[in-house]
Image: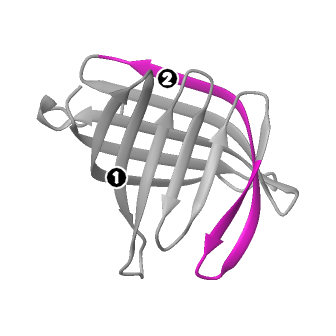
Amino acid sequence: MTKDVLVTVKGIQSVEDGESPEEVEMVAKGEYYYKNGHHYIFYNETIEGFTEENKNTIKISENSVEVKKKGLTNMQMIFEEQKKNITYYATPFGNLQMGVAATNIEVKEQESCLDLCIDYALEINGEHVADCQLSVNVQEMNSGEFTLHI
C-alpha cells in the first residue's frame, strides 16, 4: 500500500436502555506505514465547534491495536482481545477514566487497502455504558475506489 491514504473511521455505540445504536463516521486524508511488523496509520481529525485538530495514530500489532489522540482531546486506548485496559480521556470539559475490553479484533489486509474491526465494551468511571464497534478502512489515494469494505 502507498503512503498517501484515505482513512474512514466508523464508530457504533449500543447502549442498554433500548435506544437505537449511535453511529459516527469520519473520513480524512492520512498516511500509512508498515514497519517492523506493525501497521501505522496517521490522520488529523477536526472536532465540530473547535479550531484545534487532533493528531491521531493507530498502531496495529499482532496481538493488539493502539489508538492515540493528541491535541484538543488526549487519549491512548489499547485493545487486546479478552483483556480490559484502563486509560484517561482528557477533554476540554474534564478528564474521564475509560475502560475498554475488546471481545473481537479483525484485521484484513489487501494490496491496496486495510480493514480493521474491533468489538469492545466501554466503561466510563468504572461503569459499563455501551457495547461498541470501531471500524477503520485505509485505502490508497490512487486506487480510484473509496468505499467502506466492512
Amino acid bearing label 1 = Tyr
Q: Determine if the magenta segment contains residue 48.
A: no
Which residue in the protein does label 1 denote?
43
62 up-or-down from 116: above or below: above
- Circle 1 Cα neighbour tier, 10 Å, few/some/many (<14 / 14–19 / ≥20): some
Q: Name the residue: 56% across, 65% down.
A: 74
Give 131 or 1, whichever is nearer the viewer: 1
**Res 49 quadrant in image:** bottom left
Instruction: Give the position of the C terminus as an image quadrant.
Output: top left
Q: Is residue 117 left or right of residue 9?
A: right
Q: Which residues are magenta?
A: 86-110
Taking the magenta stretch, the answer to whether it contains residue 87 is yes
Identify the residue at horizontal 70%, vertical 39% (top origin).
Answer: 120
Element class at badge 2: strand
* Residue drawn at 61 percent across, 53 percent down: 76
**Rendered image: mark on residue 107:** 2
| Cα distance between the residues tagged 1 and 2 | 19 Å
Question: Of all residues shown, which one is farthest toward the right?
Answer: 126
Q: Residues within 10 Å of mark 2 (few under 14, many from 20)?
A: some
Question: Residue 113: image x %, image y %?
Answer: 30, 26
- On screen, 76 above or below 132? below
Relative image position of residue 34 (x, y in whole percent):
35, 27
Q: Amino acid at mark 2?
A: Val
Q: Main secondary structure of the magenta part?
A: strand
100, 17: nearer the viewer: 100
Q: Residue at x 81, y 56 (%)?
A: 17
Q: In the image, is 68 to the left or to the right of 104? A: left
Where residue 105 sits, quadrant-wise, is top right
